[in-house]
Image (tube, grey):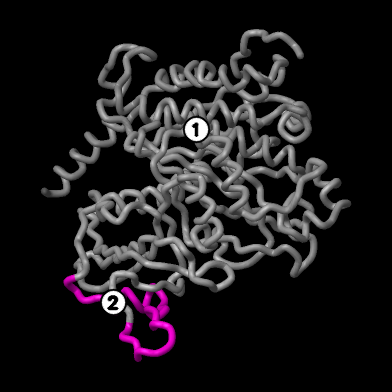
């Protein structure tokens, strides 16, 4: 292809990417209808209007999506919107319950996967709820910075099915140093009676609240989630099936090899303890099975896997009474020569569970990272400037709702549902719209919602 042909082809491709402004005019009424079930619980009309305005701002092309920027973008006074997000006494948990119901209804499948993942929000100040007040106190690992620093940490719940993946709920983690400081808790607006809870206890709380709403077969998470044996034990007691990543130094006993021969006196010897990384490296090449997970951006994604029935140690370094399945997934480079990464997982699934099923769930674990990245980059999840407990939860809740709207628009584009837009035209709609829909439209005065009874 010569230069002229290339330019002609480029112009044709760019022309196909053009979206008429009328498309955005159709998106905004859909957003208003989308928000109706969420704002129904807010009672007051002005609260419903503020919620709609704020979500529109989160979905806009503002570079920094805080209250002040959003208010000025829509030609409004800052203080009323700031009060709505930061101080107004509306129950954000009710909105997240509605979000969970919608996600369960729209994306739910019997083999769905619940994914739990902590995420950090770097903060330079020391007054925001959950952030260290002084150097060395309550400083936490912040994955976004790749180091221990001042940041807020939240544990997120995501839902993954064959249809899509979406964020459902979150809990703010308060370090124990925070919960011991009553004056500091009061200043940050933390509700009275709030006790220290580990991140895993926050997970169990979200599971209890949404487990029945979100049809699922599996629970998964990263190695921070999978490390404590008591947490996996509690999930077994709840009859939940899990596949959790674990650190490479996790100790296991291989139950599929014969124990060492005894001397004839004393207790019979037990199988030796070894870390999962050393065990995996000792396995012969014939033990690994190649699994084609999915088509990647640069071709098929093929991994090597093996599984083994094992016993682990509990938190007191005693042998656990329950068998688990060790699942190892090994990734190679593009040429399938060098091993680039090895992940280790523990599961309570039956031993006959296919490796391909384990691979599917392990991939679902990574989907929540995509969800968080999308929420932070496209729906302002990390752009808040609130310091108090209530404002943090209000902002996070509205951002999760905005992200869910992006998911619904993406799915709508894929389905080409004709119910909410005009007939397809060459410039009115694309035959294959991009999977990541983003609102890039300025609307100074959002449409007012119908009046609702005041409470």
Magenta stretch: give its range. 260-286
Q: Is residue 277 left or right of residue 283?
A: right
The image shows residue 349 at horizontal and vertical percentages of 36, 52
Can see residue 12? yes
Q: Nearer the viewer, residue 257 or 454?
A: 257
Quadrant of the snapshot with the C terminus:
top right
Q: Does residue 101 show up magenta in the picture?
A: no
Q: Nearer the viewer, residue 270 or 100?
A: 270
Determine which residue is flagged by label 2: 258
Can see residue 296? no
Q: Is residue 449 above or below residue 372?
A: above
- Residue under the point 71% across and 17% down: 46
Label 2 element class? loop
- Residue under the point 50% across and 39% down: 167
Tag shown at residue 390? none
Q: Is residue 449 above or below residue 204?
A: above
Determine which residue is flagged by label 1: 212
Which residue is the extreme one toward the right?
A: 183
Please identify the quarter of the rendering in which residue 92 is found: top right
- Residue under the point 72% across and 63% down: 138
């Amino acid at each position: 292809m010569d230069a002229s042909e290339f330019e002609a082809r480029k112009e044709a491709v760019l022309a196909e990417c053009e979206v008429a402004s009328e498309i955005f005019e159709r998106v905004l009424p859909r957003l208003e209808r989308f928000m109706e079930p969420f704002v129904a619980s807010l009672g007051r009309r002005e609260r419903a209007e503020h919620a709609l305005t704020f979500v529109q701002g989160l979905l806009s092309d503002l570079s920094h999506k805080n209250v002040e920027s959003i208010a000025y973008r829509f030609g409004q006074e800052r203080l009323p919107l700031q009060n709505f997000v930061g101080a107004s006494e509306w129950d954000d948990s009710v909105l997240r319950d509605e979000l969970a119901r919608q996600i369960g209804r729209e994306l739910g499948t019997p083999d769905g996967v619940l994914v739990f993942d902590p995420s950090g929000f770097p903060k330079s100040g020391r007054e925001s709820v959950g952030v260290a007040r002084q150097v060395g106190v309550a400083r936490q690992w912040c994955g976004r910075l790749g180091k221990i620093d001042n940041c807020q940490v939240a544990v997120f719940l995501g839902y993954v099915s064959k249809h899509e993946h979406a964020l459902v709920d979150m809990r703010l983690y308060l370090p124990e140093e925070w919960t011991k400081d009553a004056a500091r808790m009061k200043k940050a607006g933390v509700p009275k009676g709030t006790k220290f809870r580990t991140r895993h206890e926050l997970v169990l709380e979200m599971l209890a609240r949404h487990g029945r709403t979100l049809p699922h077969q599996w629970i998964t998470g990263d190695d921070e989630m999978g490390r404590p044996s008591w947490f996996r034990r509690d999930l077994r007691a709840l009859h939940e099936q899990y596949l959790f990543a674990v650190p490479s130094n996790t100790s296991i006993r291989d139950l599929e090899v014969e124990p060492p021969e005894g001397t004839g006196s004393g207790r019979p010897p037990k199988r030796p303890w070894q870390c999962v990384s050393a065990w995996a490296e000792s396995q012969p090449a014939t033990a690994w099975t190649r699994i084609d997970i999915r088509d990647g951006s640069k071709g098929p994604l093929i991994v090597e896997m093996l599984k083994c029935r094992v016993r682990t140690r509990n938190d007191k370094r005693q042998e656990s009474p329950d068998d688990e399945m060790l699942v190892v997934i090994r990734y190679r480079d593009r040429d399938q020569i060098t091993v680039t990464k090895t992940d280790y997982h523990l599961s309570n699934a039956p031993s006959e569970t296919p490796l391909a099923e384990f691979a599917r769930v392990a991939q679902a674990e990574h989907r929540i990272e995509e969800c968080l990245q999308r929420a932070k980059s496209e729906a302002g999840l990390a752009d808040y400037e609130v310091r108090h407990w209530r404002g943090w939860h209000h902002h996070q809740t509205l951002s999760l709702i905005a992200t869910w709207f992006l998911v619904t628009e993406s799915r709508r584009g894929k389905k080409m549902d004709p119910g909410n837009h005009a007939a397809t035209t060459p410039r009115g709609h694309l035959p294959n719209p991009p999977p990541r829909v983003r609102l890039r439209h300025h609307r100074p005065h959002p449409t007012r919602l119908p009046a609702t009874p005041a409470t």
